[in-house]
Every structure is written in C-alpha cells, then in structure tokens.
Amino acid sequence: MRDGEQAPGVVFSRADKLEIATAIAAAGVPELEAGTPAIDEEERADLHAIVDLRLPCRVTAWCRATALDLDHAASCAVDSVHISFPVSPILLGVLSKDEHWLWRSLAELAARARDRFRYVSVGAQDASRADKTLLERFVLAARDAGADRVRVADTVGIWNPRQAWCSFRRLRKIAGSRLTRILALMVSLLIGVSRAPR
C-alpha cells in the first residue's frame, strides 16, 4: 500500500485505502505496510483509520531513521514500524550522515521502537551498494538491538537474482536464530520516490 501509491499520478482516497486494506487482509496477507506517517496529518489520519478497521493482520508504518518519525507512527496507533537506515556510502553522503551516526542511531531508535511497538523491522536501504562488512555488522547490530526483522533493500536494482540470493544466504547465516527473519527486497526506482519530506 505504501509503494503502490508512489507511481506518478496515483493518489488513493481514504475510502480507497480502507477498501484496499480490507481486501488484502481478506486475501490472507499477514502484514500491511500501510503508509508513511511523516508525510502529513492526512496520511496519519488514513493510517489510524486502517488500524481502526481491526483487520486480522499487522499494520506497519514506514519510518525514516528519526525519533520524530517514530512519534508520528505512534500517533497512528500502529502496532508495527519499519525503520529505514541508509547503509551505502552514496546514500549516507547524500543525507549528510556517516557511520558514526548509523551505529548510534540504530541502537537508539531500535530501543525506542521496542518500547513503543509490538513489532520492529529495521531496513538496510541501498544495501547492494554498501560495503559487505558494514552490511554484516548492520544485521548483527539490528539483531542485538532487538529488531524482529531486518529488511535488505536493493534500492536501485544492482543485484541480479543470484547476487541477491548469495547475500541473503550469507546474512541469514551470520544473523543466526536470534533474528526471526531477514527479508531481501528487490526494489526498482521505476515505482517512484517517497513523498515523505527529507
């Protein structure tokens, strides 16, 4: 539901979102990543309305790696958050961040999220352009900070299927059984960019 609205010219009304969420839950999908609370008040109200449906699935809010985004997510009454961290030198540079910020923020924000949400997903954004050692350390740090899931995103479509599989296998082995899930995503920029303010 979040990425589906990122195509140019696609805007869902609240009624559309409620209908889509209901249909997805009825199909047996266990989780809805239903929106980005940082966008605006209307987006937060839409998320809250989805939560109020009390669907038989987890409703997740997508957050940037900021405390304010977690505050916005909590105001929507979601029980789950995904926190996206830039991990490539390119994306860290674009966002004027460095590795010191990454490790400090990962520990702080994951702990804050654990206190406020039932389920915490942590994402490695632009993972395919990250240093392999850094990515391995990120997965271990997320696990140790209490994340339920680590999501590894090939944000700009660099990995081929075999590269993605090899990376996924290596990271799963490193993480061990203390992390319930590592989810590898192949994401194309063709779907557009988030409307959330940077």
Image (cartoon, grey):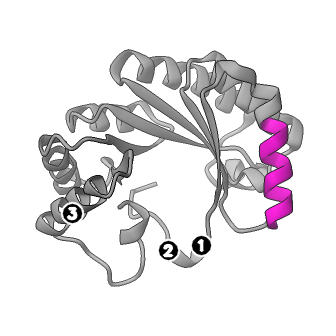
Q: Which mark is residue 17?
A: 3
- The residue segment tinted magenta is 160-171
Horizontal and vertical percent position of residue 10: 32, 79
Horizontal and vertical percent position of residue 145: 60, 18
Q: Which amino acid does label 3 sit on?
A: Lys
Q: Which amino acid does label 1 sit on?
A: Leu
Q: Which residue: 81% across, 67% down? A: 160
Quick check: 143 left or right of 171? left
Mark 2 lies on residue: 192
Spatial distance from mark 2 to mark 1, Cα to Cα?
Answer: 6 Å
Q: Which residue: 60% across, 27% down? A: 180
Q: In this view, does 17 lie above or below 98?
A: below
Horizontal and vertical percent position of residue 133: 88, 35
Kind of element beneath mark 1 = helix
Spatial distance from mark 3 to mark 1, Cα to Cα?
Answer: 23 Å
Nearer to me, 173 or 115: 173
Q: Is residue 58 above or below residue 114?
A: below
Kind of element beneath mark 2 = loop
Kind of element beneath mark 3 = helix
Residue 5 makes an appearance in the image? yes
Q: What residue type is labelled 2?
A: Gly
Residue 159 makes an appearance in the image? no
Residue 174 lies in the magenta stretch = no
Horizontal and vertical percent position of residue 184: 67, 50
Mark 1 lies on residue: 189
Q: In which quarter of the image is residue 136?
A: top right
Contact between marks 2 and 1 (CB within 8 A): the answer is: yes
The numbered mark, 3 or 2, whose residue comes first in the sequence reads 3
Q: Which mark is residue 198?
A: none
